[in-house]
Image (cartoon, helix red, strand yellow):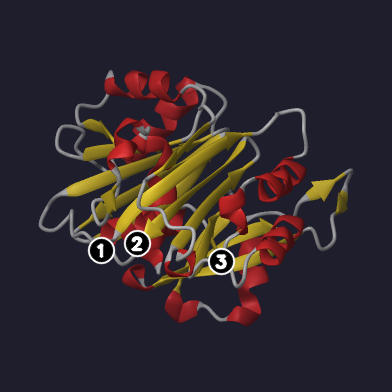
Amino acid sequence: MTNFSIVDDSFDYNITLSYFLSIRITPDGFSFCTLDPVKNKFIQIQNIIFDPSGDPLQQAESCFKTIEKLNLPYKKTLILLPTQHSTLVPAGLYNDSNKETWMQFVHSSPQSGGTTKINEESVIVNSIKLADAVNLFHVNNKLASLMKRQFQEPQFFHQHTPIIENHLSTNLTDGDRQLMFINLEYGYFDILIFGKNNLKLCNTFNISNSNDFIYFTLFVFEQMKLNSSTVSVIISGHHPSFKDMVNHLKKYLKNVKLAQFPHQFQYSHLFRDIDAPAYHTLLSLSVCV
């Protein structure tokens, strides 16, 4: 990943109240892009790499102090906060009063020195109508507060939400076709399987190296009884060894492709050199609203 900033000539600082701003924040960096919904076109994108020795929260706040585009008013502000702490719940079983119970059932509370940290994280809920489910995930309260101070009514999203919304809305798996979507993050990766226009599997695996990645991916193929010669595998994500891990997977699976820009939108010609897999989920956020 590198620092870069791209702004199309059509970006108008006077009409940003008509634009959608999408932001992705992780411990290693901050990226954001702008959609002109009238033209259905992305007209700006920027990436800032964080210093690994610094505080990500302070570095995010520094972005707000120094980048003019982040201090303009927008029609919608969509914030992607990738995390491995999430769970899907059928909509028919869910109500807001038990969201903490669902998360505690799947994920233990954050620990520090054997003592539970109080009020450090909250559970955010994304409704995924096409899957008839809700996606629950943890968000750091200090980071959420920073976003709410900076933007009016920001909406928070987990990475599974735009992936599911994007694929169920495109009917790519009608008939007998099946699709495995892999999203690589540092230290973990997501596997989602789609078939007959339904979500068949959504899971996250911790990994420390390429062998872990291969093992869990092939394990899912075996457990789900997938045919490696017919199932399409699409990979997106941010990871220091992304290219090497993709090439490693291609030794075992036939139909492995890199994620492209979401086809629902148009893009400035300046986007032609952007790493599409790295920004696929960020650019998919607008599908969710």
Q: Nearer the viewer, residue 18 or 100?
A: 18
Three-letter amino acid code of the residue under disc 3: Pro
Residue at horizontal 33 percent and vertical 24 percent from the top: 249
Where disc 2 sits, the SS reads: helix
Question: CB under 8 Å between callouts 1 and 3?
Answer: no
Q: Please indicate whether residue 257 sits to the left or right of residue 185 in the image.
A: left
Taking the spot 81% from the left edge, 63% from the top edge, the residue there is 119
Residue for point 63% across, 65% down = 151
Mark closest to the chain's N terminus, 3 or 2: 3
* Residue at the spot 52% in from the left edge and 27% down from the top edge: 2
Q: Nearer the viewer, mark 1 or mark 3?
A: 3
Q: Amino acid at mark 2?
A: Glu
The quarter of the picture where residue 3 lies is top right
Q: Which residue is mark 3?
A: 73
Which mark is drawn over residue 72?
A: none
Q: Nearer the viewer, residue 56 or 96?
A: 56
User: SS of the residue at dot 1?
Assistant: loop
* Image quadrant occupied by the C terminus: bottom left
Measuring from the top left, give residue 147's x and y in whole percent.
Answer: 67, 60
Q: CA distance from mark 3 to mark 2?
A: 26 Å
Rendering coords of residue 245 (x, y %): 41, 22
Q: Is residue 201 visible?
A: no
Residue position for label 2: 165
| Label 2 with label 1: CB-CB less than 8 Å | yes
The image shows residue 85 at horizontal and vertical percentages of 60, 52
The percent coordinates of residue 230 (x first, y second) are 14, 37
> Could you give the CA–CA distance between mark 1 and mark 3, rounded to whole angstroms?
29 Å
Which residue does the numbered mark 1 point to in the structure image? 169
Query: Callout 3: helix, strand or loop?
Result: loop
Query: Earlier along the polypeptide chain: callout 1 or callout 3?
Result: 3
